Amino acid sequence: MRPRIAVVGPLRIPGAGPVVDRVVERFATSALHLLARVGADPYVVDSSVQDRPDPSHIVRADGVLLLGGGDIDPTLYGVTGPVPELYGVDRAADEHAIAVVREALDTDTPVLGICRGSQVVNVALGGTLVPHIENAQLHRDRERMFLDEEVRLAPDSRVAAWLGKTHATVRSGHHQAVDEPGEGLRPVAWALDGVIEGIEHAHARVMGIQWHPEDPDGDPQDSLAIFTAFRDFVREAMDEGRPPTKTEPTGQDRG
């Protein structure tokens, strides 16, 4: 059976121009194609629209992939002062994604968060973020947005097992990152400057990576490895007793 994957993220970012819109569309399309290629059945949930489906309906899917996007509203993780270079904040989309993660935990629905999605996972579990990395040249390219970044992976982590190595070159473009991990989460990947680049839950099937395996300019073998392993991650939950999708989830089919 092809696992049904809800691909959740804001397809429109407040204040972003056409260049960013095209990047968002390109990355979302790439994620859908990769999921379909590895034998999953993906569909899109655009969290930037007002009629976004209820999180309890989204987790009827077999798994959830949380995409990147704008910055999370800093008040959701306890920051009330000004944040340098804050952009694309959409509190309604943030609250929706956080609710999806919490529903997924309650229903044992596997979750993989990418970039902003990883940060959403952390905030949903009570963690905090670094609101602005002062020297972010390792993490983003100001002109091209994304760059190659070296990360170190914990040898006993899922993501190291997925990639079959403990060091990787990944595609990154971020000025924020996980600071204090949320309840049940642990850091499992780090940049050269020590910034946390990956988190995993100790017991639940929930994890996040700060980089973009769906970036078409990244390593194609590593991208395929991540999406293949995520498919297997979802299938394991199905095989261990989580019932497969019984009702058609609400969303936009684009796979």
Image: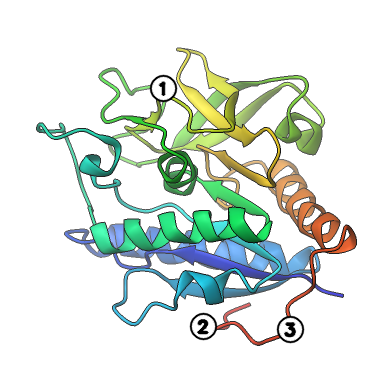
SS at mark 1 in the image: loop
Q: Nearer the viewer, mark 1 or mark 2?
A: 2
Question: Is 195 placed left or right of 49 in the picture?
Answer: right
The vertical placement of 39 against 83, above or below, is: below
Q: Residue 138 got which mark?
A: 1
Q: Residue at x 35, y 31 (%)?
A: 129
Count of numbered labels shown in the rendering = 3
Question: Is 22 placed left or right of 73 in the picture?
Answer: right
In x, y percent, where is residue 31?
Answer: 59, 61
Quarter of the image with the C terminus in it:
bottom right
Mark with earlier residue (1, 3): 1
Examine the image and state in which quarter residue 48 appears.
Answer: bottom left
In x, y percent, where is residue 221?
Answer: 75, 44
Task: Residue lying at the far front in this picture: please name it.
Answer: 106
Q: Amino acid at mark 1?
A: Leu
The residues bearing labels 1 and 3 have C-alpha atoms spaced at a distance of 44 Å
Quarter of the image with the N terminus in it:
bottom right
The vertical placement of 245 against 193, above or below, is: below
Q: Residue at x 80, y 57 (%)?
A: 237
In x, y percent, where is residue 72?
Answer: 30, 47
Q: Residue at x 68, y 55 (%)?
A: 110
Question: Dot 3, crowdedness within 10 Å: few (<14), some or many (≥20)?
Answer: few
- Identify the residue under disc 2: 252
In x, y percent, where is residue 191?
Answer: 51, 20
Question: Dot 1, crowdedness within 10 Å: few (<14), some or many (≥20)?
Answer: some
The residues bearing labels 3 and 2 have C-alpha atoms spaced at a distance of 17 Å
Q: Amino acid at mark 2?
A: Gln
Mark with earlier residue (3, 2): 3
Question: Dot 2, crowdedness within 10 Å: few (<14), some or many (≥20)?
Answer: few
Q: Amino acid at mark 3?
A: Lys
- Identify the residue under disc 3: 246
Give yes or no for contact between labels 3 and 2 (Cβ–Cβ under 8 Å): no
